[in-house]
Image (cartoon, rainbow, N blue to C red):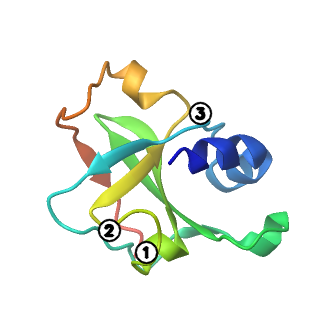
Amino acid sequence: MGNFSYWIEKLDDHYFGKTGMRLFPGTLNIQLDEPYTLPGKVIRLEGREYGGNVSVNIVPCAIWGKSAFILRTDANEEGRGHHPRTIVEVAADVKLRDHFHLNDGDIVEIDTFDQG
């Protein structure tokens, strides 16, 4: 959809404040075999923090050891957004597709960390 690329760039300071990382303006969409449900504790970027109406859940993760973050809107988590819960959108400080030389259909190893 390309929405996160726009919003990551527009809200760069907000994402940096939440993650401590300057995120590349775009996400790597990963198709999972099973639905992913957010852990009990997540980092939140609330819509009211930037004058918007979309809140984003931010979950630290790693792709092949590279620090990254799963970004998921409340709508996507609730099953009423653009993506089903079998898709996670991952952002890092680099364009992950280029960094790992990925093509559509490649298998990706993603590790999430228990947030409680």
Q: Residues within 10 Å of mark 1 (few under 14, many from 20)?
A: some
Q: Position of residue 15 (x, y in %)?
A: 68, 51
Q: How many marks?
A: 3
Quarter assignment of residue 47? bottom right
Residue behind mark 3: 24
Q: Position of residue 41 (x, y in %)?
A: 47, 76
Quarter in which the C terminus is drawn:
bottom left
Residue behind mark 1: 77
Residue under the point 49% across and 27% down: 95
Give the Cα distance between marks 2 and 1.
Answer: 6 Å
Q: Residues within 10 Å of mark 3 (few under 14, many from 20)?
A: some
Q: Relative to 43, is 84 on the left or the right? A: left
Element type at marker 3? Answer: loop
Q: Residues within 10 Å of mark 2 (few under 14, many from 20)?
A: many
What's the residue type where badge 1 is placed? Glu
Q: Earlier in the sequence, mark 3 or mark 1?
A: 3
